[in-house]
Image (spheres, rainbow, N blue to C red):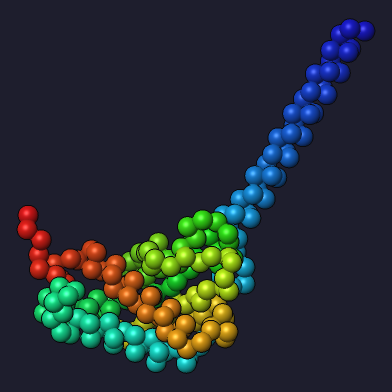
Amino acid sequence: MVTSNINTNKKGLTISILIGLILSVFLIFFIYAEFFNHITAFDIVDKENDKIITMFDKQIQIQINEHSKRNISLGYIQGSRQHTIDYLATISSIESYARYGITSSQSRNNLELKITFTDGKIVDKIYTGVNCSASFEPHLLLKVLMKSGKTAKVYTNGSEKGDSTNDIINDLNTIINSAISYNISKNHDDYFIPKKK
């Protein structure tokens, strides 16, 4: 009789532990889905927008012009213009995305870039300095296909429909400026006087 009660208690304890583990797994899954991987329709960049092509090319030209003159305040050397043009010609696509999803309330939900080069190399998680807070309207996400340093096609997540032209231009400038800044960080001496060693 005592042995039967002990066996029953062990079975009950085992079942309780098993139920607790299953509930813990579900709880962890839901917490992860809510805070770390909150993907919505605004994270999908599949809507072609030809109107942005000329706008993006204009932002590219503005960035090249920044390197065209020997800008003392920024410290660019004379050859930085050509290095910028050569670098842009190696890009196949630039894609922006929110680190944790466009509507996530997770802290440090930064807008980041993924650049694909013509040789197949992919660089991901390029910092832009822009935060995609869930408290604002969905941020404009872009995928820009490039050919010979110019814009060939542009796809968006559709959130540009509510934005003003100035908002879109700011987003485009952030993307191209961040893409060029990535190259500057990797090839400092192509843009500035070489550092003394």
Name the one closer to the observer, 102 or 2: 102
Q: Reply above or below: 1 against 176.
A: above
Q: Position of residue 163 (x, y in %)?
A: 53, 84
Q: Residue furthest front?
A: 73
Quadrant in which residue 41 is drawn: bottom right
- Image check: 72 left or right of 99? left
Q: How many marks do you count on the picture?
A: 0
Q: Position of residue 113 (x, y in %)?
A: 40, 68
Could you tell me which residue is drawn at 19 percent across and 74 percent down? Answer: 74
**Residue 181 visible, this angle:** yes
Q: Position of residue 153 (x, y in %)?
A: 44, 86
Quadrant into which the N terminus falls: top right
Q: Residue furthest top?
A: 2
Could you tell me which residue is drawn at 45 percent across and 71 percent down? Answer: 96
Quadrant into which the C terminus falls: bottom left
Q: Reply above or below: 128 against 59.
A: above
Could you tell me which residue is drawn at 18 percent across and 66 percent down? Answer: 188
Name the one closer to the observer, 51 or 69: 69
Q: Residue furthest right?
A: 1
- Image check: 40 left or right of 82? right
Q: Position of residue 144 (x, y in %)?
A: 42, 80
Q: Reply above or below: 3 against 37.
A: above
**Residue 86 visible, this angle:** no
Could you tell me which residue is drawn at 84 percent across and 18 percent down? Answer: 9
Quadrant in which residue 147 is drawn: bottom left
Q: Reply above or below: 176 against 107.
A: below
- Image check: 66 left or right of 36? left
